[in-house]
Structure formats: C-alpha cells, structure tokens
Amino acid sequence: MHIQTTREDHRIAWLAALAICIHILEASFPSPLPGIKPGLANIITIMALLLFDIRTAIWVSLLRVLAGSLLVGSFLTPTFILSLTGAICSLLVLWLASHLPGRGFGPVGYSLLAAQGHMAGQFAAAYYLFIPHQGLLRLFPVLMTLALIFGVVSGTIAHAMLQRIPAHNA
C-alpha cells in the first residue's frame, strides 16, 4: 500500500522540523529559573497560523512537543506533561482567538495570547499534578509577567520574519 503525501504534509513536516530544532537548541541553554524558557519555537507555531491556518499550527506545535521530548529525553516525564499541557492550552487560546469576528490578531497579539495560555496551562498542571501547595500561587504573577515579556519578544520576531516573506506582504 502506497500512501501519498500532500503538499500540506510536507509543509507541516518542514515547519515542525524547524520548531523541533529551535526547541532542542533552547533546551541546551541554561535557564535563570528552573523550567523557564523563552519558548522561541512557538514563533514557528504563530507563523504557521498566520501563513496557513490553525490546523497547521496545531500539527506543528504538537509534533514539536512530541518529537522534541523524544530527542531531548523528556518524553513522559513531568517536563513533557507540562510542555504538552501548555501547548494544548496555548492552541486552544489560538483557536478561540482565530475564530473571533473581525480581522483577527497580528503576530504579536497571537504570540502574547499563546504565551499566556501556555503559562497558565503549565502552571495549572504543575499545581494540580505535582506541587499542590499554596506557596506556589505566589509565583503565578511572576510567571505570567515572564510569559507576557516572552510573548511580546516572540511575536516581534515572528512579525519581523513575516515582513520578509513576499507573499505575506501582498
């Protein structure tokens, strides 16, 4: 039986591979706070959403989490669970935002929403599954502030990259 791949399959594979490479590179850098990363691979998810559609963004994000965790050795660990939970929450927020009436959000707006959704999802999973202690709640505003900063940075990078794609500027 021969399975025919489509142009969309190739596009998703290429974008996922790019996001996975960024994910692995980012995982190799030390973090100032345990578990805090800027989430630069999410730039690719935002670009997939804006250049193609939410379906492509979902595939890219979930493949990045799965393959990235297999390659860095975190598959089925708490890190994987937090990453997957964050990605699912982020994608849910992006799906909702992309279905709002009007022109939608730009790369910075989508990135900001995705980062906030990702952090809120990760925090909820950490609290309910791993550290159900009231003291953890004190970190929530700090983590959401970092997500805000990283979301704006990632969105700004995505915006700059999209400006260099001729078809996107037309």
Image (spheres, rainbow, N blue to C red):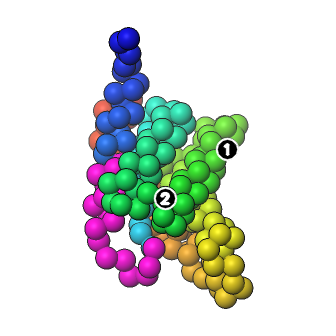
First in sequence, mark 1 or 2: give its number. Answer: 2
Q: Can residue 24 be found in the magenta stretch?
A: yes
Q: Can residue 28 be found in the magenta stretch?
A: yes
Q: Residues within 10 Å of mark 2 (few under 14, many from 20)?
A: few
Callout count:
2
Q: Is residue 151 visible?
A: no
Is 72 or 14 nearer to us in this picture?
Answer: 72
Q: Which residue is mark 2?
A: 76
Q: CA distance from mark 1 to mark 2?
A: 28 Å
Q: Position of residue 99 (x, y in %)?
A: 67, 37
Mark 1, secondary structure of its residue: helix
Mark 2, secondary structure of its residue: loop
Query: The C terminus is located in which quarter?
Result: top left
In the rendered view, would you say 16 is above or below 11? below
Part of the protein shown in magenta: 19-35
Q: Are marks 1 and 2 in contact (CB under 8 Å)?
A: no
Lateral position of residue 161 relative to residue 90, left or right: left
Q: Residue at x 54, y 36 (%)?
A: 54
In the rendered view, would you say 89 is above or below 103? below
Q: Residue at x 57, y 80 (%)?
A: 142
Farthest bottom residue in view: 135
Q: Residues within 10 Å of mark 1 (few under 14, many from 20)?
A: few
Q: Position of residue 168 (x, y in %)?
A: 39, 34
| Residue 5 picture quarter | top left
